[in-house]
Structures are given as C-alpha cells and as structure tokens.
Amino acid sequence: MALSAEAAHDFISFVNASPTPFHAVNSAKERLVKAGFKEIKERDSWSSTCGPGGKYYLTRNGSSIVAFAIGKKWKSGNPISMIGAHTDSPTLRIKPVSKRQSDGFIQVGVETYGGGLWHTWFDRDLAVAGRVMVKTSNGDFVQKLVKIDRPILRIPTLAIHLDRQENFVFNKETQLFPIAGLVAAELNRQGKKSSESGKEEPASEDGPIEPLKALTKRHHPYIITLIASEAGVEEESIIDFELVLYDTQPACVGGLNNELIFSARLDNLNMSYCTTEAMTRSVSSPSSLDNDPTIRLMSLFDHEEIGSQTAQGAHSNLLPAVLRRLSVLPPTSSYDSEKSYDKVIEAEISTAYEQTLSTSFLISADMAHSVNPNYGVKYESEHRPEMNKGTVIKINANARYATNSPGIVLLQEVARRAKSGSGVPLQLFVVRNDSSCGSTIGPMLAAALGTRTLDLGNPQLSMHSIRETGGVYDVEYAIGLFESFYEHFPELEGKILVD
C-alpha cells in the first residue's frame, strides 16, 4: 500500500486549531457538520428526530462530543460499533485569582492539570486559550472560544551559574510560575507611576453586594482586555472564564525524510482526529448506510487525564445515556410523532438496551508508547512498538487495558479488510513486569457497559511532554483501521462466537 502523508498534514491543521478540549470539540464538530451530521440536544426528545439513515452529533459542556450514524436496516437491540477517545491533555490552567507580581515582574498564577512532564514547560513561548462566559444584551449567558495567538507568558529557568543541581528539581507551586511582562511596562501603558503599582481603589459600599470581586481585580486587567478583544465583546460582559496555557510553536512535520510529527497534544488529539476522520469517511458515500443494520458511533470525552469522574468524562452517564436512547430507536423513520416509541411493541424494546450492549464493540483509542532508543531498557524485549509501523494493540494482564483475545481476533479481521482489502499493519504492546502501567477509558467503560472492548493507540515518544513526537504514516493507518471497523463490524460481529 502506498503511504500517504496527506492525513498527517490535515491532522496538523486540526491540532494547531485545538489548544483546549473546547477547541478540539469545535474542530471535530466543524468536520462532522461538513459531512452532513446534524446537531441534537440531550435535553430534547429524539424520537421524532433520529431515524435510520440519519447522522447526528451532540455535545456536553462544550468539551465532549458524541456523533453517530444510523444504518438504514437498524432495528432496536442491534449492535453499535463505537470508538472512544479523549480531548484533554496535561496543561497549566489559570487560577481563579491569578493576579501576582514580584520583583518588578507581572506574574500569572496557574495550577497543574493532569500528570504533565512539567519541566518541559520551562522556557517555552506560551499563550492562553479556552472559553469565556459572556453576558449578552438580553441577559443570557453564552460561551465564546478564545485563542490568543501570540506568546504572552513564559516560565523561566534559573541560570546554571546560580544553582548547579545535577537533576532539575523545582517546586510546582512557587517556581512553575509564568511571567507575563514587567510592572513598569504595564504602568507605562496605563499612564501610571511606579508608586501606584499594586494599589487598588477601595471598594464602594454603595449599591448591591457583588458576590465575587470583578475579573479585573482577580486577574491582570490587560489580560482581560486581550481576552475581550479576542472574543469580540466588551470587557464588562465577561463574567468568568476557563483558560489554559499552550505552546505557541505550531505542530509540524519533521525528520530527515519528513516521516515524523513534532507536536503538542498528540495524546490524545491524534486519536481524536483519526476517530473523527474515520467516521466522516465511512459515511461519505450516499449508499454507505443502505445495508447497515448497526449504528456507527464516536465519543470524544473530556477529563481522561484526571480520572474521567466528571459529568463530561468517560466515567459519567454520557455514553450509557446515549446508548440507552439509541438502543430503542424504531426500525424506520416514518414515525413522526413524539410518541413514536409507543408504536414499537413493548416486548421488543424492553430488553433492547441489554441486547445492544452485549452485541456491541468499543475501541478505546488512546496513544501508545513507541520504543525510545535512548531508554531501550525500559521496554519489554519483544514488545517494542515502532513509529510508522501501524497502530498498537495495548494489553495488560492486570486489566489496566481492556483488550482480550476475542477483541484481538476481531481487530485483525478489521485490519485485513482495511483499505479495500490491502490491509493495515498492527503492533502489540505490554509493559515490563517491573514497570508501572498507565490506563485508559477502556476498562471503566467496559465495566460500566459490559461491552466487548479493546485498547489501542498510535505509537509516540515523550507522552505528556509539552512537545511530543509521532509517526506521519501512522495517522493514515489508524484512519484506515477505524474506517474498516465501522464498515465491516456488521459482518464480523456474529463471527466471533464467545458469550
């Protein structure tokens, strides 16, 4: 099979536009809409909206997204082919009260999110991105995405002359502390004198009590000005925000032969992109759903890096709630009343949810570890994944991954059928017995749903660094694998005879 770098370049556009989970969901949504998917809401009834042949998506909190395409031969209780990934990555988040200054520097208070390799965040050109909550002229509160595209923050290391420590050790509270500029420069911008630095006007005792201090009291005023300008709103209309730091250096293709990807957030936007692209490709033909008795579903969750136990994480009711509603969808779209479910014989749908779960399959797609040539001893001798040699099946005897033999059999058959039968390669990975093992959304969803599940991911170096490395051609391999899974699961589901 001829290897193509086109998908890798498209992924680079995706990741560069997605510095936060909110932006990642927005990027996925744009691609789904372009492919004909229609937005639905959790709060609405789906009975008169969703039907065989339809393509839909929904979001929760603006940071998780579920999309699905319903086969035209769907019946309640039939299987659902699912791929799950996550939208978040380790980062630094601006604290609720971030305004700091010390020794003539303006500083911004941040808190760590997830298990980052925090030493890699020093001496990088950092900006901020996220969402702001804005009060509109009619009194509503809406979300707006912001992404400041220039470096405004930096975390400085201490010169080696002042501390010749052999290992780089630092305090995350007091030394992982970005500077945003000089106090004197900001006073000059405001037309104030240095003697006025740090002075705040006394709060007025007249009028109603404000529950919280104004944003310009909790954060540096010029940061609020930049955010308002980026959001296209007045500063006074910003009520609150969730902003994180990101590296302004864009992702790019590198290596002597342009075979590598150098990027932030490969874990896990690489898998989020491949999942979204596979979904849209699998339904690109007008006849793609004509003979499909299943539902093709993707779910990109927030908060995997901090345990998933949030309303928008994989440990929430998001996926189970969606599956329960889909499992009882009637077999035709001719029902046009809000009570269309009532027209399906009750006996046929009373166990539809359980039937769907028992016949469905979930791929948990989260990046895997490539062998690192500088630390080869850290890898099990016969399980050393390499870049550009295919997606990695992740296995762990202690169920840190959800993979088992029936799942491996299924995925091999899917891989054989990929790319119109030319196939895609796969690799295997286990950790050493004397090494710790990470985990994914796979085991928690497998336990919650009772659905057959397999863990996999593309190989990468420097996981959780601010700058990671992956393979150019693995992007296309994963897309081909996932697209084949959506297309061939109806045929393969009944061939793996394990109950």
Image (cartoon, rainbow, N blue to C red):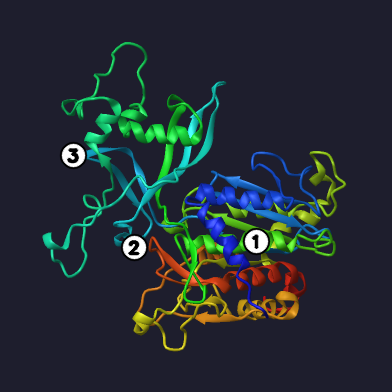
Q: Which residue position holds label 2?
A: 117
Identity of the amino acid at label 1? Glu
Q: Residues within 10 Å of mark 3 (few under 14, many from 20)?
A: few
The residue located at (79%, 42%) in the rendering is 48
Question: Where is 391 relative to 6, above or below?
Answer: below
Callout 2: SS: loop
Mark 1 and mark 3 residues within 8 Å of each other at the beta carbon: no
Nearer the camera: disc 1 or disc 3: 3
Q: Residue at the location (72% across, 70% down)? A: 489
For marks 1 and 2 on the same chain, the one whose residue lies earlier in the sequence: 2
Q: Of the residues tagged 3 and 2, which is closer to the observer?
A: 3
Spatial CA distance of label 1 from label 2 is: 29 Å
Q: Amino acid at mark 2?
A: Leu
Instruction: Tell me if residue 44 comes above or below residue 25 in the rendering.
Output: above
- Which residue is painted at 33% across and 56% down in the image? 124
Give the crowd class for mark 1: few <14, some 14-19, many >=20 residues within 10 Å. many
Q: Indicate the quadrant where residue 421 lies.
A: bottom right
Estimate the spatial distance between the alpha carbons at disc 1 and disc 3, rounded to whole Å. Answer: 48 Å
SS label for mark 1: helix
